[in-house]
Structures are given as structure tokens and as C-alpha cells.
Image: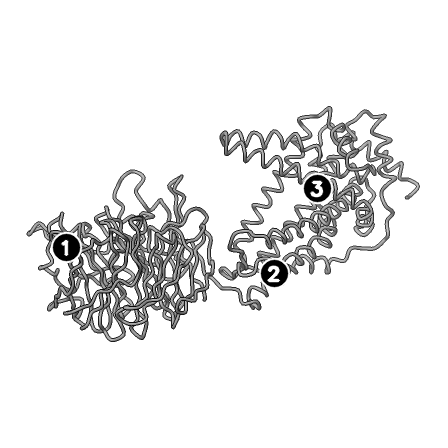
Amino acid sequence: MAENSGAVADVWAERMRAALVGTSALSIVGTRVLRHLFTLMVPTTVLSIPVGLLAAALLPIAAAGRLLVVNGRIDLVGDADVPLFAWLGVLVLIGVPAAAVAGGATMLMAAGRVLGWPVPWRSALRVAVRRGRGLTALAFVQVAFLALTAAAGVALTVFVNPWAGIAAIVVVGLALMPGLLAMPAMLLEELGPFAALRRAYRLVATMRFTSPLLLAIGVIILPGLAAGGFDWVADRLPYPVNVAVNSAAAVLLSAFQAAVLAVVFLNRIAKQWHEVSRPELRAIVDRLPERDGARTRTAPILALLVLPGLVTGAVAAVNPLGWVEVSDHVAALSPADEADDDGGDRGPVVWSRDLTALYVSPGPKLAMYMQGFDDDAPRMLTCPDLTCADLDIFYAGDNRTDRFAATAALPDGRTVVASWDWDQAERNYRLRLAACDQARCSAPGKPIAWWSKDDGQFLWSRLAVAAHPGGVVLVQADRPDDAKTLTFTSCRDLACADPVRHTPVRLRRDIAGTTDKHALKVAFGPDGRPVAAVRDGDSGAVSLVTCETADCASATVTTPGPPLTAAGARMRGLSLAVRRDGRPVIAYGDPAAGAIKLLDCQDRACSRAESATLAGDRHEDPPGLVLSGDRALVATFADAHLVVHSCRGTACRATRIAKARNVPERLAMSLTGTGRPVIAWIDANPRVDEWSLRVTSPLI
């Protein structure tokens, strides 16, 4: 130590005495420490960055099967389990000691800057490493206190009210704030962990309110605001830069927090009586390590700071481990689009429960049909791409009182909408076909007049529609007396000038309840013959109607699924697709299994079917089902996650591709021209009546 160390301490004490009159500890940090913040970041950079890279390298082992590349960024989707908790435990056991040693070294360097005796980072690290056991013990004690405070706040929030929880966290947190000064006390005064804690509380005894408040501002509030600002900026940057900015911000804010603790500690010492503070300050200066004369090399430190971003960006771009790549975007749609604030009519609006169908045309462009049972007007929501950042909402018919019935994709990329048209002259509803593109819908022909129903009768009808290059088929289920009839109407084109109508089958059992828009589905086989699937409203069982001819003049009925219980009324709807060899595939909610059932028909009539039980909840809505090559892809919700089951036959593999921020409600599924599934789904918070529309597309 230099011979004038005592004079340095005296000079510093005089400066502190003058600072007490009009300068706070935070001002000292700003004027004497911040300009050296890059140097103060070195200990944390040297220790924390390698620990972070090691943790990132071990994460794929602990989270096997749950790491995804979402929008070009590595993301973890899934619930925590034993391997992940083990990884977290290893990270804590390694990371807390490293952070404690790095923070201690930073405090020594900050104290040296304030005292006029700069301490090189290597010397500071050597001292901190020698005190590493005590620093680690103190850090774990503080982490335990923090966890207990958070637990008490959560308990009060749950069992009393949120304000009680917030008040408890604030009061207990302020009471624990002086304990943060134990770490600089341990380093600068060479005390043990518990002696350092006693010293910290005695030091602020005469300033019991201002000291905790000052620490809260300097260690929590200001770094928290800065972290929010860094995060806001990083979110708008490319992924590698984002990671580099976030890691550098974490290092910088850690160094700032350590510097604040060191300065506040010295400030509280200086505020003691003159005869006490001077010898204590002199002793602190005497304990500072010698200068080693080595200069900090900027290039290696900067390289360490940007290394996480470079490594993470390279792994996400190359994807050497073959993680599932997912596009997941929140559409530019919110509950504000539901209704006008002043009650005025500002055009079509949508509700979270209205999502009914999704279709993808080349681009890929999206078309979503939104229709609620009680709402008269069907709406169409279109997006120019998978991000859905720019969308349009318009009515799916010329008449806003049209009643939605069914939709299907046309071969040319448009969508056919079968809806109920109100005939003012006849005072009843008639069925008509309309074609919709990305901007509007138009009806090329007249309504199908002989399907006219009065207002009450058509509410009991169910309608499904399918299209292929040879025309359009509509299937209608109505209820004369006590029987169910299925009527097939074939049209050569959308004008449907010469419809061919047949009623090949009668079902004595009821179709699912009147509010179920998915109880009846129809699809074309590769030979142009239709296949329809019906959900029984009493038992929930599934029936398959297989047309023998293209116009369905005759048909056979089979029941491929096992009989279900009356609980099926809670698990409505079904999804239908037909393989290239003509074999149907059906997915629906199975109340007996409490999951999703997949039926893989072994022949066209489904006289024999193999079944698979898939994990999934939210059974009141049908799962999504599409065929991609020889695979059946089924989309379901499970434990607030969006899951895609990839099935070859009945051998299925589940992949979680997204997690709801709140509660998942509805989904609709389709395929791009390249066979990539696209899922539109609702992420809702029913407690505050908020929801968002998300579009997720995995590359599986």
C-alpha cells in the first residue's frame, strides 16, 4: 500500500463530509463510478458469461423434446420436470457463487474508484475468490430471504387480497434492504457473513427509512427500469443482437448494483460521527489490494460480451439438433374489435368464440371464418401472410342478416360459403352459395329456393359443404317429426343452376345439439364421391355416410367408433379428412377416455377402423385435423399448450408447439401448399374479458 494511503482516506473523508450536505450516494455513483462502468463490468463478464454458456450447453439435455426454434429464436415450450429442475439446481449451485464472487470484486473496484485508489480487476477477483465461501453463504441467505418474502406475498394475494400481498412484499422487502450492505461489509471490513449482517443493520440504525429507500431505488427500481428499456430495444433487434444486448445489459446492471452497494456502504460510514468514521475509512483504504499495473484489454471483454449472441444466433440459424421450427404470431386483433366504445356501428366485429374455420391459399394467405350461433352475420377475417400483422374483416355475404352454415376451400384458392339468405318478399330464409377472396364475397347464382325454411325450422338444420374441381356438394340435416334425414345436393359450379338432390339415408338418432356447428362434416374422396361424418347428439357416437355415386343417390352408414356415454354432450363436434386412397380419418372428443380419439378407417366405408387415444383437453370443441402426405396431423390443447400429433396409422408422436399465455379456447387448422400445417387459435383471459388471435405454423 502506498505511504499516503492515510492521506487518501482523510481526503476522501473530507469529500464525503462535504457531499453529505448536498450530494447523495446515487450522485456519487453517477459522478465517480458510471464513467468507469465498463471496467467494473469485467469481473461479471469473466465469470458469468462462461457460466451462462455452460448452462445453455446443458439445457438441450435437460429439456429434450421441448426446445423449439420459434420465429427464428430458441424457446422452451412445456412444463418443468425432474431433469429441468435438476438443470436449474446445477445452474443455481454454479451461478450463485460465481455471481457472488463477481459482485464482490466489482464492489472492491467501485470502492477503490470512490476512494481514489483504483483496484485492478484481477486483484479484486483474487480477493473475492479468497472470500468466496463467505460471499456464497451470504448470497444464499439473501436468496432464501427473498424467496420467503415472495412466498408470503403470494400467499396473502391468494388467501387475502392482492393489495395485502403487495403491501407485505413492500414492507418486508424494505426491512430486508439493509442486509444487502452485508456483502461490502464482508469485503471491505473482512467480516464473517453473520457479523457482516449485524454490521449492515447497525450502520443504518440512525437512518432506518432513508437507507432502505435509497437501496431500493439504486438496486431495484433504477435497474428494473433500465432492464425494461433494454428489453424493449432488444425485442426490436435481430435475434443474435437481441441475445448480445440482453446479456450485456445483465452484466452492466449487475455491475451497477454492486457499485451502488459499495458507495452506499461507504456513504453510511461517512455519515457517522467524525471520530468514528475517519479511522474506519482509513482501515478500508489500508485493506484495498495493491495495484498490479496491468491494463484492461477491451477487445477480449467485448468478445465475451457478444459471444452469447453469436453462439445462440448460429445455433438457431443452423439448428444442428433438429429442433422443431415454428412460426407463432399474435394477429393484429384485440377485444377492441368486438364493439364500438360508444355503441355505434363501425362494421363487422368478432368475438373470441366465433373462430370456426381456417383456409390457406397460395402465398400463403389466410382466411378465417368467424360465426357465433346467436349472431346473424357471418364474418370473414383475412391475412396476407402467416404473421397476420395486417388483416381485414368483412361480412361473408351481401346481407348482414345472413345466417352462417358452412364453408369449404375451392380449388382456385377462394372459399365457398353456404349461408342462409333472407328473402324479404317470401319472408323466409333460403340457402345460397357465395365465393370469397381476400377482399369480399359474391354470390354468382340465385338461392337454392326449394331449401326454403321458416325462421324457426332452419335453426334445427345442420349444413356441411365440400368442393373439388368437379363441383360442390352440400349436405343438410333437418328434422321432420322424430327422424334425422341427410340430404345431399350436388352442384356443377357455384351458380348451382341445376342442383341434383338425393336423400339416401335416414338417421333415427339425433345429431349433436343445435349450437354445435361441427356435428356434420363432408369431404370428397379422390374418386369424387362424397363422404359425410355425423356426431350423435345423445351419445356422442360417430356415424359415417359413404356415398356410392358422385351425386350420392345411394349411400351406406357405418358406426366406426365404439358407443359412448351420455357425457358426449359435453364433447361436441368432429373433424373429417379423406386419404388419397379413399380411406376416411376422423378425430373427435371421447368422453369415456377423457381425451381425443383418432379413427383410422381401413377401407372406404370404414367397416373396420383402428383407433388411437391422444392426450388433449378442451373437448367441447373438435380437434384440428389435416392430412400431410401419409400422416394425419391432429391439433389439440393439452395443459394450456397447443399440441400437434403426427400420426402414421395409429402410431402418433406429440409435439408441443406453443403455450397459451392465458386459456386456449378455440382452434382451426389447415395446410399450406407445401404441406405445412397452420393453426389459428384463441388465447383468452376470461377473468378480464381479454383475448388474442394467434397463428401458429410448425415445420413438422
Residue wearing tag 3: 140
Q: Quadrant of the C terminus?
A: bottom left
* Type of amino acid at the residue the image marks with label 3: Phe
Q: Is residue 136 left or right of residue 484?
A: right
Give the SS element for disc 1.
Answer: loop
* Type of amino acid at the residue the image marks with label 1: Ala
* Type of amino acid at the residue the image marks with label 2: Ile
Q: What separation in Å lies between label 1 and label 2 (alpha carbons)?
A: 59 Å
Q: Nearer the viewer, mark 1 or mark 3?
A: 1
Q: Earlier in the sequence, mark 3 or mark 2?
A: 2
Q: Nearer the viewer, mark 3 or mark 2?
A: 2
**Residue name at image x 58 percent, y 63 percent:** 313
Checking the image for residue 61, the label placed there is 2
Across and down, in percent, residue 265 comes to 75, 35
| 122 lies above or below 316 | above
Checking the image for residue 483, the label placed there is 1
